Amino acid sequence: MSSSLASPLRFKRLLLTGAAGNLGRELRPRLKACCDTLRVSHRSDMGEAGAGEEIVIAPLEDRDAVLRMLEGVDAVVHMGGISTEQPFDPILAGNIVGVYNLYEAARKQGVKRIVFASSNHVTGFYRQDEVIDIDDRVRPDGLYGVSKAFGENLGRFYFDRYGIETVCLRIGSAFAQPKDRRMLATWLSFDDLERLVVAALTAPFVGFSIIYGVSDNKTLWWDNQKSRHIGYHPLDSSEPFRAAIEARQPELDYSDPAVIYQGGGFVRAGPFE
């Protein structure tokens, strides 16, 4: 549903990629408060445009289509691409070639800010008994995490070389509510997702920034102190769900890599051949 949380700052035209994906569907009605026109894109049909919307069908690996997609755009919320561990070929097309096409189109079309949906899986091979921040080295837990690390590095390059500002959101577990004990630490509510994206869009100056996308949970593995300049203030917490989750999952297998490492089940996903 549409939310009243969005900032009063408005863009003339804002692009949301991956608008038919899980998080894109949540953000689509919420981001309309940030812009006069919301351009939404996906690789396949999304039906009719709503009020104040434009629809563009553009596979991210199609360079010419992506260039057209960014024409007249003031800022981008990039939620498109592959969002789970998959074989390499679709990850290459969507998350590596696709993000390159996006940044090149932004450069050519004069877009100055991108909010990039990265992932906690960029650092998924840190242990769950560690607390890390944005200066710790990347430790991807799979090919998906590797592709998101590539996207972060590309964003860094395009800021240093071309001045395109990027906020990389290392999104935790964005669901209506946490599903298991891991998510007591990684959960990001949909309202906090909106707060995070709006803060990343509207902070006066972000340069190249990384911030973990997580709610105000009692248990946390990620320290966002170095990203306070974004102005993100989460208001939700996984704590109200703790008792029910621990009752459903009273014991953990501490020999299971999914329990040991922050990436959870991603650390043992694949291979696919």
Image (cartoon, rainbow, N blue to C red):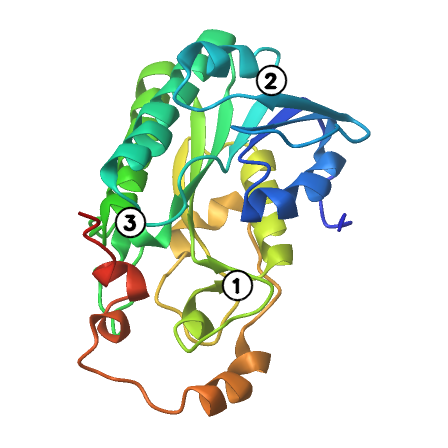
Secondary structure under tag 2 reads loop
Discs 3, 1 touching: Cβ within 8 Å: no
Q: Residue at 64% x, 48% y: name it.
A: 26
263 displayed left or right of 245: left
Secondary structure under tag 1 reads loop
**Amino acid type, residue under disc 3 in the picture:** Val
* Disc 2 to disc 1, C-alpha distance: 29 Å
Disc 3 marks which residue?
122
Asked if residue 57 is positioned above or below residue 236 in the image, the reply reads: above
Q: Residues within 10 Å of mark 2 (few under 14, many from 20)?
A: many
**Amino acid type, residue under disc 1 in the picture:** Ser
Disc 2 marks which residue?
73
Mark closer to the chain start, 2 or 1: 2
Choose between 203 and 137: the one closer to the eye: 137
* Disc 3 to disc 1, C-alpha distance: 18 Å
Q: Residues within 10 Å of mark 1 (few under 14, many from 20)?
A: many
Choose between 186 and 10: the one closer to the eye: 186
Q: Residue at 62% x, 50% y: name it.
A: 195
Asked if residue 230 is positioned above or below residue 185 in the image, the reply reads: above
Choose between 19 and 201: the one closer to the eye: 19
Identify the residue at the far front of this view: 273
Q: Residue at 61% x, 21% y: name it.
A: 56
Discs 3, 2 touching: Cβ within 8 Å: no
Disc 1 marks which residue?
215
Secondary structure under tag 3 reads helix
Query: What x and y, as percent, mark residue 77?
Result: 54, 33
11 displayed left or right of 133: right
Query: What x and y, as percent, mark residue 43?
Result: 51, 28
Mark closer to the chain start, 3 or 1: 3
Q: Which of the two marks, 3 or 1, is nearer to us in this view? A: 3
